[in-house]
C-alpha cells in the first residue's frame, strides 16, 4: 500500500484542497487495510505522522524548519553552506496551519481505529513458555500459530535495548515451519531446534497462539513480537 511521505505536509504544492485530497486518499486506504485486519505497517505509520503533526502544532517555530532548503548562489560562490528558506510567505504558513488543523483529528481517529483492532487481536492471543525457561531470556525462539490450523511458524529472536530511553525492541527471523500434531508437539519442535541449532543448547522457547484468524505478517507476527517483549521484560 502506498504510504504517506514523511514530509507530505510541506513538500510539493502547499494547497489546502490538494493536501486534503492526498490525506483522505491515504486514510481511505488505511481504513480498507484495517477492515482486512491488516495493521502493519499502516498503524505505525499513522502514529509517526500523528506525532509529527502534534509536534508542529505545539512548536509553530518548527514549521519553517520542515521545509526543504537550497543553497543560495552567494553561498555556492563563497563555498559557504548558507541556506535560504524556500518559503517565508505568511499566506503559505496560514495555509499550512489550516491543513494541520484539518489533518490532526482525522489521523487521530484512524490511530484510534487501528488501536481498537490491535487490542482485539491482542486479547485473543496467548503466550506461554515451551518447557522449562532458562535464566537468560533475551535470545531464543518463538512459535506463532492459529489453532485449529496446524501450521506453526518458528522464529528466532533477540531482544535489543536502546540505552537512551531503556526501551526494548526485538529482532526476529523466520527459520522454518512445522505442522503440529499428536506426534509433533511444541515440545518435540523445541527438541528439534536444540538438535539442529547447537549455538543455543538451552534456549528460551515461547509459543504465541491466536484464537482468531488474522493475516500473519501484517498483523499476527508484529503483535506476537510485542507480546514477547512484554513477557520477557516482566520475567527479567
Image (cartoon, helix red, strand yellow):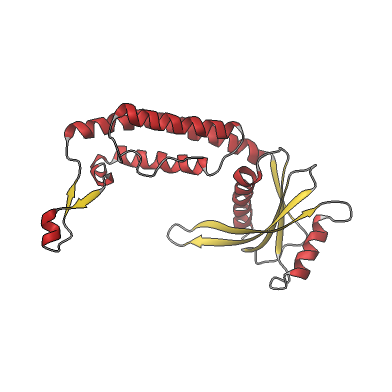
Residue 38, compared with residue 175, is above or below; it is: above
- In the rendered structure, the answer to whether residue 58 lies left or right of residue 129 reads left
Q: How many marks?
A: 0
Occupied quadrant, residue 196: bottom right
The residue sitting at the top extreme is 17
Please give left or right for residue 7 compared with residue 77 in the image.
Answer: right
Tell whether 171 sits left or right of 183: left
The percent position of residue 84, horizontal first and vertical second, equals: 16, 49
State which quadrant residue 114 falls in.
top right
Classify 205 as above or below 46. below
Q: Residue at x 77, y 49 (%)?
A: 151
Look at the image and tell me whether residue 203 can be seen.
Answer: yes
- Left or right of residue 215: residue 182: right
Q: Is residue 108 visible?
A: no
Instruction: Point out residue 235 in the picture as x, y percentages from the top left corner.
Output: 64, 58
Q: Nearer the viewer, residue 232 or 196?
A: 196
Q: Quadrant of residue 165?
A: bottom left
Query: Which residue shows up at 48% across the image and 32% down it?
Result: 110
Residue lying farthest right?
183
Q: Position of residue 83 (x, y in %)?
A: 18, 53
The percent coordinates of residue 120 (x first, y second) are 63, 35
Looking at the rendered image, the quarter that the C terminus falls into is: bottom right
Amino acid at each position: 500500500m502506498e504510504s504517506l511521505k514523511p514530509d507530505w505536509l510541506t513538500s510539493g504544492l502547499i494547497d489546502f484542497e490538494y493536501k486534503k485530497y492526498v490525506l483522505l486518499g491515504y486514510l481511505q486506504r488505511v481504513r480498507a487495510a484495517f477492515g482486512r485486519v491488516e495493521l502493519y505497517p499502516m498503524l505505525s505509520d499513522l502514529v509517526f505522522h500523528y506525532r509529527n503533526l502534534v509536534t508542529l502544532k505545539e512548536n509553530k517555530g518548527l514549521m519553517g524548519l520542515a521545509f526543504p532548503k537550497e543553497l543560495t548562489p552567494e553561498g555556492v560562490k563563497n563555498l559557504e553552506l548558507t541556506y535560504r528558506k524556500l518559503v517565508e510567505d505568511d499566506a503559505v504558513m496560514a495555509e499550512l496551519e489550516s491543513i494541520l488543523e484539518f489533518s490532526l483529528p482525522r489521523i487521530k481517529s484512524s490511530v484510534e481505529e487501528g488501536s481498537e483492532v490491535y487490542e482485539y487481536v491482542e486479547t485473543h492471543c496467548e503466550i506461554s513458555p515451551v518447557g522449562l525457561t532458562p535464566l537468560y531470556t533475551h535470545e531464543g525462539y518463538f512459535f506463532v500459530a492459529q489453532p485449529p490450523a496446524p501450521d506453526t511458524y518458528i522464529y528466532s529472536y533477540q531482544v535489543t535495548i536502546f540505552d537512551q530511553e531503556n526501551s526494548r525492541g526485538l529482532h526476529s527471523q523466520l527459520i522454518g515451519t512445522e505442522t503440529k500434531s499428536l506426534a509433533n508437539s511444541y515440545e518435540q519442535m523445541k527438541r528439534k531446534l536444540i538438535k539442529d541449532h547447537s549455538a543455543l543448547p538451552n534456549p528460551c522457547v515461547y509459543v504465541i497462539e491466536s484464537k482468531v484468524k488474522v493475516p500473519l505478517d501484517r498483523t499476527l507476527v508484529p503483535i506476537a513480537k510485542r507480546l514477547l517483549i512484554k513477557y520477557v521484560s516482566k520475567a527479567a
